[in-house]
Structure formats: structure tokens, C-alpha cells
Image (spheres, rainbow, N blue to C red):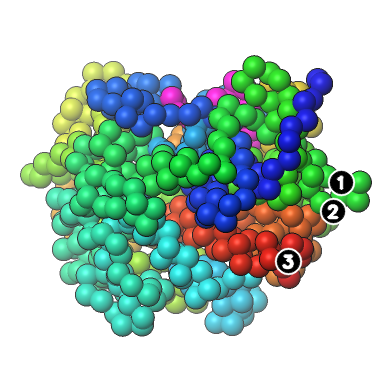
């Protein structure tokens, strides 16, 4: 295909999601010419998310309206290296976005910070327990950046996205009603916390009776009208129940479309090009400098866009795949345990206790993606792991549902279809709720991303291949956390309860979490990481790779807050250090 070469720009951003829009906005203020390429379509929040279409479950949940089109590009999956990977044909375990705003449009708004322990997982585990506590084939490592270094950028992101919450630790002083286990924060959340649901109130009372410390989920769903630092106004959340998988009909959900993009588009030196799919980063003859990217537009035309600085800010899979397709960094080899690109892939570990009642009624439609109540006693290293056989921990929390098509809880032993199943759904739809466990996931030698040798996308390029399964560490973690959830469920007084920890092998079919991480890990050693602490490529200094692809392993906490903080951190690093003296920052 003949390529049309365009006029060079100062900065090229690949992906207009949470990270890409923030970095572009921060750099646009320097006056540099910036182009952002996004493979998805542009959305008009006032039109595309207008009522009643905004709450169309068939369109948004079943038909994946704003999610990745798997007929053009997907990934292949297998549990182990000796298996043949097959393509993911339908959206299942996770939901990558495909629109301007990316997965930040359909996210649930839960906006946690990672714990200080999460950034120093390996060193802190070795210091407290010794080397025998780590699984033999675990490749988890320290990030090269600490919580204290990232704290101002967590604060910056929380104010851009108007996060609602209650501080639990202000400058080392524990605050009543917040999470006492969180890292110290410099100031309170910009908005008050979300209201407590009926299920959340029952969970709180039972948790407190057991000596735990419940707190409201931090959420980027406004609890009052809010104007952010970019002078953009977000409305108050109505708790309509349609949040995950949906755009927001009231403009209350912070996303790239509402919290950043309207301000970014006012910059004359910024240009957004939707429906432009980047297929390669082009290097100079020495393979030490990115000179341009190649992309295909909606009409199938190929263009080459030169730039002085290239920043990858797409979803975790796309960041990793672009590096592999472009020959940047050494691909990871699980046999020799050498190479870095594709290494340290991790997911998140689930589990839940589903509670059913005869004497209590709940309204699943009075909900919101971030509406929930949690405890942190069993997160990170907040409890003694001696003799437990695993590291890491889990959030234990009660959320909210919303919708009807995707929610049909029934007690164990109910037939999977037919009249008895229908009766059970009708009986328990508003007489049940779940206590969820969202656990950490370590990275291992045998869990990685690479290019599939067989399957290709619509452009003839190899698909990304995922090799992943639950490890014994994660199975034990899930069993432990789920037993604590069941203990709370018993204290609440459920009539019956389904207790479901992670068992067997990981399946890519049912939805679990869009919290995929790794593949372009950050760290202090080029032999085990793709980017340094500033998210700068070790191999190509004018390339930065920002997103959850940088996580060396996964926390129990939702990743979006950390992705946003890393974007703010990288933007400052580029503005304050790199632009003044382009080159290697470490």
C-alpha cells in the first residue's frame, strides 16, 4: 500500500483515552504542535448518550456499541504455552473501548489509588517474609517509582476527574469514615462521598460488628455540580443504574469526553484525528529514534505522520502490540525468561459471596458504577500473610448493579434455564446482592503477551496472543478473601448464600474485569522493564509508553486512578525535563 507522508509535528499521541487526553492537554499548554490519532469514532455526548437511547442494554451491553470491533481486530488466547491459541470472537472477560475516550467512556468510575505496598511489592515482601514467600516463578517487581512520588499526581488526577470520596489518611492523620489503610494524601477529595445504598448500609453494620472499617468507594461520578481545573462543568449523578458499559446521560460521569476533551479542543495547536488506526512506529536507521508512525484512515488510505516525540497511550494490549509490530525492545521469551516486551502480563483475581433474602428488598436500578462500600483489611499487605501461601490481597466490597438483561441472580442448584429458572430470577432479582472480592494478581514466567503466529487482523498484521491462567497464589488469595466475604454475609443474615472463589482455569468467556495490565512494564532495570520510571522507552528515548501496560503486576484496586496519575506524572516529566534537554532521562 502506498503511503502519503505528512508534515512533521512536535508531538504525536496514539490513543485518545484517559492517559492520552490528559498528556495532550498538559503539553498543548506549551504551544507545541500536537496530533492525537484515535482508531475509534468521535462521539457527541449530548447526542450519542441522550435519553432514552443511553439506557439501551441490548445496544450497549449485548452488541457492544462503544467497544472494540472484534471482526477487524481481536486477540488470541490460551491458558498454557503447549496449547493452540484461538481468537476471542465476542466481548467477554474484558471490554476494550473503541471510540474517542476509549474504555474511559464506559468505565464504572471507581477511582482508587494503589497502596504504597503495591509499588514496592517485591522488596517489601522479601523484607517482611523472606524469599520463600514469593512463588518460585513470580516475576513481580518494584515499579521504580514510589507512592510518595506519585501522590501529587494522584491528587491532580482526582481533581481533574472530580472524584467523590472520603479521605482516610490526611498527611498521616487517620480520618474517621475513610479508608485507614490508604497511603497518606495531601488533601481531601474534591467532592463528598457517594451516598450509601441499602445493601451498603447492611454491609457496613456487619463489617463494623466484626471489627472492620468500612468506607465509601471513591468514584468519579459527581455528588454535586463540579467545575474541574480545566474549567469544565460536570453535573450531579442521578444514580440511574446505567454506568458500566454505558455513556452518561446526565454528564455526571467524568471521562475524557467530559473532563478533558472540550478544553483540549480549544487549543489551536492540537488536532484530533479519529478513525485513524496506527499500525507501526517507524525508527531511524540506528533503531534508536522514532521518526514517524504509519496509520490507516477510515477510507483505507495509509499515511506516515512524522513527529519529534511519540507517546503511546492506547489500551494495554495495543501499546504492547505496537511495540512488538515495530520491533522496539526485545520480545519476551518465556523459555529463557529473557526479553521484556510482553512480559509481566497480569489480570485481577475475582470471587464473590452472593446473598439471598426472604425479608429484605433492594432496588437494583438505584445504582451507579462507583456506588459502593468496601473494607481494606485484606488488601495488599495490610494483614499478616505468614503461613497463608500467597502474597497480595483483595478489596471486599458491596457495589450496585443497574439494568435488567445482565443481572439475574439465583441460588445454587437452580436450573440453568426453563420455568424454574424464570421463577427463581423473578423471586430473587430484588432480594439479593453480592459481596465482591477483587484481588491482586502477580506476574509469572508463563503469563505473557506475544504476536500470534497464525491469526492476523484486517490489515494482515499478526494478532496479539495472550497466555494466562490462574496461579496457585491467586487461587489461595481468592479462597481466603471470599471466606471473609462469606463471614460478613453470615453476619448480615442472608437466608442462603453462594460462595464462589476462583477455581480451576481462567476462562476468557464470562465478563470479569477490564483491568488488564503489563506487557510494557516500568522499572529500574532495562533487563526486566520496557520503560523507566518516567515511562520513557529504554531503547528509543523519544518514545513514551503510558497506561496500565506499565504495571509490573496488578493491584487489587481499580487501575484508572493510577493510569491517570501516571499520565500526569509523565506529562510533567516531559515538560519539565525532556523538552528542556531531549534524551535519556535515566
Q: Residues within 10 Å of mark 1 (few under 14, many from 20)?
A: few
**How far apart are labels 1 and 3 at the CA level?**
20 Å
Q: Position of residue 374 (x, y in %)?
A: 29, 60
Compared across the picture, whether 400 is left or right of 470 comes to left
Q: Position of residue 583 (x, y in %)?
A: 77, 63
Say if residue 106 shows up in the picture.
Answer: yes
Compared across the picture, whether 131 is left or right of 339 comes to left
Q: Report which residue position mark 2 lands on.
A: 288
**How far apart are labels 3 and 2 at the CA level?**
17 Å
Dot 1 and dot 2 residues touching (CB under 8 Å): yes
In the rendered image, the quadrant that contains the N terminus is top right
Q: Residue at x 62, y 29 (%)?
A: 276
Q: Report which residue position mark 3 lands on.
A: 581
Q: Position of residue 560 (x, y in %)?
A: 46, 52
Among the two numbered marks 3 and 2 on one chain, the one whose residue lies closer to the N terminus: 2
* SS type, badge 1: loop
Q: Residue at x 47, y 40 (%)?
A: 265
Q: Report which residue position mark 1 lands on.
A: 284
Q: Is residue 124 above or below residue 501?
A: below
* SS type, badge 3: loop
Q: Position of residue 293 (x, y in %)?
A: 74, 38
In the rendered image, the quadrant that contains the C terminus is bottom right
**Which range of residues does the magenta coloring cover?**
64-77
Compared across the picture, whether 33 is left or right of 18 comes to right
Q: Residues within 10 Å of mark 3 (few under 14, many from 20)?
A: few
Say if residue 499 shows up in the picture.
Answer: no
Among the two numbered marks 1 and 3 on one chain, the one whose residue lies closer to the N terminus: 1
Dot 3 and dot 2 residues touching (CB under 8 Å): no
Amino acid at each position: 500500500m502506498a503511503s502519503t507522508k505528512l508534515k512533521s509535528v512536535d508531538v504525536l499521541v496514539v490513543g485518545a483515552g484517559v492517559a492520552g487526553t490528559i498528556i495532550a492537554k498538559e503539553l498543548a499548554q506549551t504551544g507545541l504542535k500536537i496530533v492525537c490519532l484515535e482508531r475509534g469514532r468521535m462521539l457527541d455526548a449530548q447526542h450519542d448518550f441522550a435519553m432514552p437511547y443511553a439506557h439501551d442494554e441490548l445496544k450497549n451491553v449485548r452488541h457492544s456499541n462503544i467497544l472494540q470491533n472484534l471482526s477487524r481486530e481481536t486477540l488470541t488466547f490460551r491458558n498454557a504455552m503447549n496449547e493452540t491459541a484461538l481468537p476471542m470472537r465476542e466481548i467477554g472477560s474484558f471490554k476494550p473501548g473503541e471510540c474517542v475516550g476509549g474504555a474511559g467512556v464506559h468505565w464504572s468510575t471507581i477511582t482508587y489509588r494503589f497502596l504504597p505496598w503495591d509499588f514496592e511489592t517485591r522488596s517489601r515482601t522479601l523484607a517482611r517474609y523472606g524469599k520463600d514467600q514469593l512463588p518460585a516463578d513470580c516475576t513481580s517487581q518494584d515499579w521504580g517509582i514510589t507512592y510518595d512520588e506519585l501522590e501529587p499526581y494522584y491528587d491532580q488526577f482526582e481533581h481533574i476527574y472530580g472524584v467523590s470520596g472520603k479521605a482516610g489518611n490526611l498527611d498521616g492523620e487517620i480520618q474517621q469514615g475513610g479508608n485507614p489503610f490508604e497511603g497518606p494524601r495531601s488533601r481531601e477529595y474534591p467532592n463528598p462521598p457517594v451516598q450509601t445504598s441499602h445493601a451498603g448500609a447492611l454491609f457496613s453494620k456487619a463489617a463494623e460488628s466484626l471489627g472492620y472499617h468500612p468506607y465509601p468507594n471513591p468514584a468519579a461520578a459527581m455528588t454535586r455540580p463540579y467545575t474541574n481545573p480545566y474549567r469544565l462543568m460536570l453535573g450531579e449523578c442521578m444514580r440511574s443504574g446505567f454506568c458500566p458499559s454505558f455513556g452518561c446521560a446526565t454528564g455526571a460521569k467524568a471521562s475524557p469526553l467530559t473532563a478533558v476533551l472540550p478544553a483540549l479542543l480549544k487549543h489551536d495547536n492540537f488536532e484530533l484525528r479519529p478513525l485513524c488506526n496506527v499500525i507501526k512506529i517507524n525508527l531511524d536507521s540506528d533503531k534508536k529514534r522514532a521518526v514517524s508512525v504509519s496509520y490507516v484512515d477510515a477510507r483505507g488510505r495509509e499515511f506516515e505522520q512524522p513527529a519529534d516525540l511519540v507517546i503511546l497511550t492506547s489500551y494495554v494490549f495495543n501499546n504492547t502490540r505496537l511495540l512488538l509490530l515495530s520491533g522496539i525492545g526485545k520480545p519476551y521469551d518465556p523459555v529463557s525468561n529473557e526479553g521484556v516486551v510482553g512480559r509481566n502480563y497480569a489480570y485481577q483475581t475475582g470471587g464473590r459471596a452472593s446473598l439471598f433474602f426472604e425479608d429484605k428488598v433492594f432496588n437494583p436500578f438505584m445504582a451507579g458504577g462507583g456506588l459502593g462500600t468496601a473494607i481494606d483489611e485484606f488488601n495488599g499487605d495490610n494483614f499478616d500473610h505468614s503461613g497463608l501461601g500467597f502474597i497480595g490481597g483483595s478489596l471486599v466490597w458491596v457495589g450496585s448493579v443497574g439494568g435488567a438483561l445482565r443481572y439475574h441472580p439465583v441460588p445454587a442448584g437452580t436450573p440453568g434455564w426453563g420455568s424454574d429458572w424464570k421463577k427463581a430470577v423473578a423471586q430473587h432479582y430484588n432480594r439479593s446482592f453480592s459481596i465482591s472480592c477483587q484481588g491482586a494478581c502477580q506476574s509469572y514466567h508463563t503469563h505473557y503477551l506475544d504476536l500470534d503466529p497464525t491469526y492476523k487482523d484486517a490489515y494482515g498484521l499478526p494478532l496479539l496472543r495472550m497466555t494466562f491462567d490462574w496461579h496457585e497464589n491467586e487461587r489461595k488469595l481468592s479462597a481466603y478473601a471470599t471466606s471473609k466475604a462469606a463471614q460478613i454475609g453470615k453476619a448480615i443474615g442472608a437466608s442462603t448464600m453462594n460462595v464462589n472463589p476462583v477455581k480451576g482455569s481462567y476462562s476468557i468467556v464470562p465478563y470479569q474485569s477490564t483491568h488488564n495490565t503489563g506487557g510494557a512494564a516500568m522499572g529500574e532495570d532495562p533487563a526486566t522493564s520496557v520503560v523507566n520510571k518516567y515511562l520513557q522507552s529504554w531503547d528509543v528515548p523519544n518514545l513514551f509508553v503510558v497506561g496500565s501496560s506499565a504495571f509490573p503486576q496488578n493491584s487489587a484496586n481499580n487501575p484508572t486512578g493510577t493510569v491517570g496519575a501516571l499520565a500526569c506524572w509523565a506529562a510533567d516529566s516531559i515538560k519539565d525535563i525532556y523538552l528542556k534537554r531531549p534524551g535519556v532521562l535515566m
